[in-house]
Amino acid sequence: MTTPVTPVDNPSLPHRTWCLDGPNQPRLIELGTWSQADGGDRILVASAYAGLCDTDAKIWRGTAANPLVRYPIILGHEWIGRVVKDAQRRFPPGEWVVVEGFTPCRHCRECNRGHSNWCLSPAHSGITYDGGFAPWSWVPASALHAVSPHHSPQAYIFVEPASSVIRAVDHLVDRRSRSVLVLGMGSVGRLAVLLLRDRLPQVTIMTYDPVATRSQWAGRYGAIAVESVESEIADAVIECSGTIDGFTAALRAAQAQGVIALEGVPERGETAVVAPAMMHFKELTLFGIYSSTMQSFQESLDWVSRREAELASMLEGPYGAADLPKLMERLASPDRRGKLYISWPSDINAEKVRQSLEDSVFGY
């Protein structure tokens, strides 16, 4: 049973958030007790809106498979904010910026090969440096993308997850898939349906989620909700649940010579029993989608700007950062109405933060 938590119109002061000292070791900190030095070529950004996802919950529990995770850390890798301080004046104070969660170094061997998502020295918001669940953070300049929201800047928290889903959908575009099953209808699954409809308008889209009401949402986009995945029903599958059950269901549901895109990430150490002969005789192609690339992130920015109002309707919130422990529970709730997100009070602006820095109140 989850603890009730209520969205707020404007989270109240003082600005408090949770620092994660280790797995299941959250520590509530007041603004001013947490300091982080300016790391050279970094820009100070005040967080405005930040989304929660299963990766955050896994880092919270200590079960994330990502080897880059470090503690202590303030989470938040899907966020948008405003520029506060840029010593090199690349961004004017107050400009809206989206943070590229996974930021490649752009000069290592893998980056030079065009595999920026395999960068050997990446920076990762909310994983290797403090993310959007902090009131503000020093962000690598290369991670920032200026945007001009129309009415719903909170919609831009979808840029980061959509940038990964775009890569999965593009694989299916290249293979000219005719039918696609989306497994798991959380936020990532919904993004997959929207992107499939935009990029493969003629494809038959099917959806499955153990919570039947989640699949019904996709009906407005012509998707067909299926009641079970015990047989071969699609020539392509996008697995978005990040569970072992979802993985094995994808293997069952894929038709001969089908393709399976693993968008969801199971918890560290989880294993599945797979029959190699079945994969052999069905001639299945299986591939994982690890993070975004520089190209897919830019494509995602453009896509979200066109879908801003629609994506904003897929959110639940805003909540306050102090409620994060309750929100980690709510992530697993079957009655969750959309992607959970937090916001910071609108009075966090460039001028106030700059004055705070000058007064040395916050230790930066």
Image (cartoon, rainbow, N blue to C red):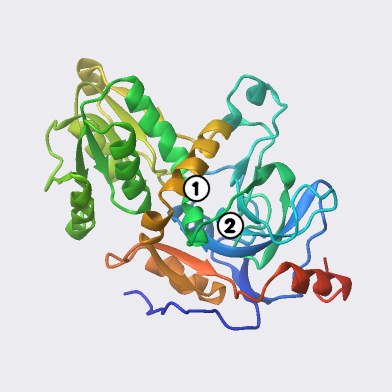
Mark 1 or mark 2: name the one nearer the start of the chain.
2
Give residue 224's mark: none
Q: Is residue 108 above or below residue 193?
A: above
Residue 359 x, y percent position in the rendering: 87, 76
- Asked if residue 198 is positioned above or below residue 44 in the image, the reply reads above
- Left or right side of 323 for 263: left
Corner quadrant of residue 22: bottom right
Q: Residue at x 54, y 61 (%)?
A: 50
Residue located at (22% from left, 39% from top): 249
Identify the amino acid type marked 2: Ile
Task: Please give the name of the residue rendered at 63% of the width and 62% of the height, measured from the top-left corner.
Answer: 74
Task: Tell me the quarter of the image containing the C terminus.
Answer: bottom right
Viewed as shown, does residue 100 lie left or right of 224? Answer: right
Depth check, front residue: 170 or 117: 170
Taking the image as shown, residue 291 lies to the left or right of residue 212, namely right
**Residue furthest bottom as drawn:** 13
Task: Please tell me whether mark 1 sits on a helix, a strand or a loop.
Answer: helix
Q: Residues within 10 Å of mark 2 (few under 14, many from 20)?
A: many
Q: Nearer the viewer, residue 176 or 240?
A: 176
Q: Provide the residue designation for mark 1.
A: 159
Q: Is 237 or 316 nearer to us in this picture?
A: 316
Quarter of the figure with the N terminus: bottom left
- Badge 1 local density, few (<14 within 10 Å), some, or many (20+)? many
Is residue 105 among what the camera can see?
A: yes
Q: Which residue is mark 2?
A: 80
Q: Is residue 326 above or below residue 112?
A: below
Circles 1 and 2 in contact, beta carbons < 8 Å: yes
